[in-house]
Image (cartoon, helix red, strand yellow):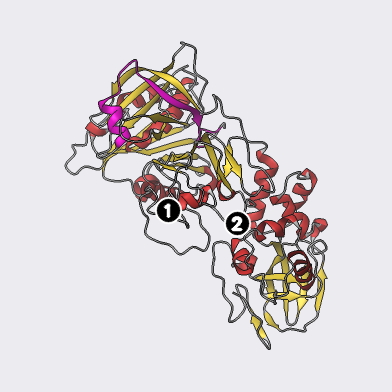
Amino acid sequence: WKAPVPGRRMVRRLNIDGDGQGDLAGHGGENRAVLVYQLESYRYWERELSRQDLTPGSFGENFTVDGLPDDEVCIGDRYRIGEAEFEVTQPRVTCYRVGMRLGEPAMASLLVAHHRPGFYLRVIDEGHVQAGDDITRTRRGPEALSVADTDALLYLPGRDPAKLRSALNIPALSPGWQQSFRELAHGGPPEQEPGWPGFRTLRVARIVPETPSVTSIHLHATDGTPLPEARPGQYLSIRLSTGKGTPAVRSYSLSSAPGAGAYRISVKREPHGRVSGYLHACLHPGDLVDIASPRGTFVLEEGTGPVVLVSAGIGATPVLAMLHRLAGARDPRPVWWIHTARDRAQHVFAAESRELLARLPHGRAYLSYTAAGEVIRSDGDAHVRQGRLTAESLAGMAIPADADAYLCGPPAFMDTLGGHLRAQGLRPERIHTEVFSALPALNPGITAAPQVRPHQPTGTAATGSVATGPLVTFARSGITTAWSADRASLLELAEACDVPTRWSCRTGVCHTCVTPVVSGDAAYTTQPLEPPAAGTVLICCSRPAGEIVLDL
């Protein structure tokens, strides 16, 4: 927490001597070195909240100032204070901590809704500053876009396209906000997913073993009509009654050619996998299964540049669908197919990928087998090596820096290979990854803890009542549990199950926690300032309105 200090303090590029930020992911750095909040806003909140206990520092600021209102200060303005000079870089990041400090959980939402966020400064010239120093504007920012208007552009609906363009013309605006505004300006409305709401019954047409541990399941519509086309790289969620407790939901990438009118998922049997074991041992042609329509954003993008498809083990499934799309169009782009398997016996889709690559004018394959003692021999035109992929082996593939790379496999594999590709010159936005299991957590400022496998909640909520509400399923984590009315939100339930979560404000402002809904509905306990896209929900401020399946 911040508190007033006497005398002069040295302000440096990253901080003020004696100060610190508790969360260097959400705060701090050159563009967020100093946080400013206004006395007039203090008076405003005293009236609005009926409070008399607000003291300088209560809003987490470094400088409490008289003047500089958010609707007059503009991004890019420069100010001389004491010996130092500063530049306005961005509004305050919506943060749950100010709500903790003030005992007002919705404070992050209120700061945005009332257009009083406060703002950050970059230090242009270091120097000493003390209470009582005059504040003199030395330069007006380009575009004259106020802090309040900039904040509203990111967090509130009804955006003005002209103001979005103006924001992108301000060099002083911090890179993170620039990136968010670029996405808003050029991304357009989210693409509608094909298919149907909730779950639909499909028929198992064929079951085909691919390797000793991987089996493909072909799915058709029960009435024989073609199924909606999926985008290459998307996945299906399947709901099964395995005879053990509540129905289980799992997600599997589509491995089939897009536009085939049918779907194929390819499932690896895990040693203790309840659902994968059932699919391998108990499912038969003709059986009926509940399937949610294709979804997911790990998809092959349109373009003309080189394409790199990188996978390990069963991670080949989504990139194989991409290879099907490229081969079906005999795409003239250079295509790299890079796959790692334990050995030839576990090399899934070996013949299929070889046949697809043969259709591409500029396709090339690189295979790595990691088992010790595996005999390395030629495999058609593929380059075959023993051992894991390394920076050196990737460099030998001469992947161009303007390629789009798609990676799927274990998280450590993707982290390592992504780092190697970045080191070779690929820009981070051109490296796309897919994670089969839960997404990595994003909880700003929370102390890192050892990762725990998702589980049923170990205890009831505050009052200890029995959970008898609707079933909530976290599809990526493989957890289904009953809702308890004592829970404040779906986010709180996910945390009780150690399901990795992604959040920042916890009051429906920042949309960090936005989560696709596979089936069911949720109701908001606090209405978000801007509703999320159709088919998604903000889990930080919602509860289930009935049985619900979340892609989490």
- In terms of depth relative to the viewer, which is nearer, 456 or 169? 456
Count of numbered labels shown in the rendering = 2
SS label for mark 2: loop
SS label for mark 1: loop
- Packing grade of label 1 (10 A; few <14, some 14-19, many >=20) is some
> Above or below — where is 331 with respect to 389?
above
> Above or below — where is 324 with respect to 428?
above
Q: Give the label on residue 97, or none.
A: none
CB under 8 Å between callouts 2 and 1? no
**Is residue 335 inside the magenta stretch?**
no
- Disc 1 residue type (three-letter): Thr
- Disc 2 residue type (three-letter): Cys
Of the residues under marks 2 and 1, which one precedes in the sequence?
A: 1
Left or right: 27 as drawn, with respect to 425: right
- In terms of depth relative to the viewer, which is nearer, 507 or 214? 507
Q: Quadrant of the N terminus?
A: bottom right
Residue 352, position as x, y percentages in the image: 34, 23
Q: Is residue 441 visible?
A: yes
Residue 160's image quarter? Answer: top right
- In terms of depth relative to the viewer, which is nearer, 335 or 293? 293
Residue 520, position as x, y percentages in the image: 53, 34
Residue 521, position as x, y percentages in the image: 56, 36
Q: Which residue is mark 1?
A: 460
Q: Which residue is mark 2?
A: 505
Instruction: Give me the residue at 73% from left, 55% from top.
Output: 113
For discs 2 and 1, the disc positioned in front in the rendered view: 1
Q: CA distance from mark 2 to mark 1?
A: 25 Å
Residue 163, position as x, y percentages in the image: 78, 49
| Magenta segment boundaries in residue numbering | 274-301
Residue 316's image quarter? Answer: top left
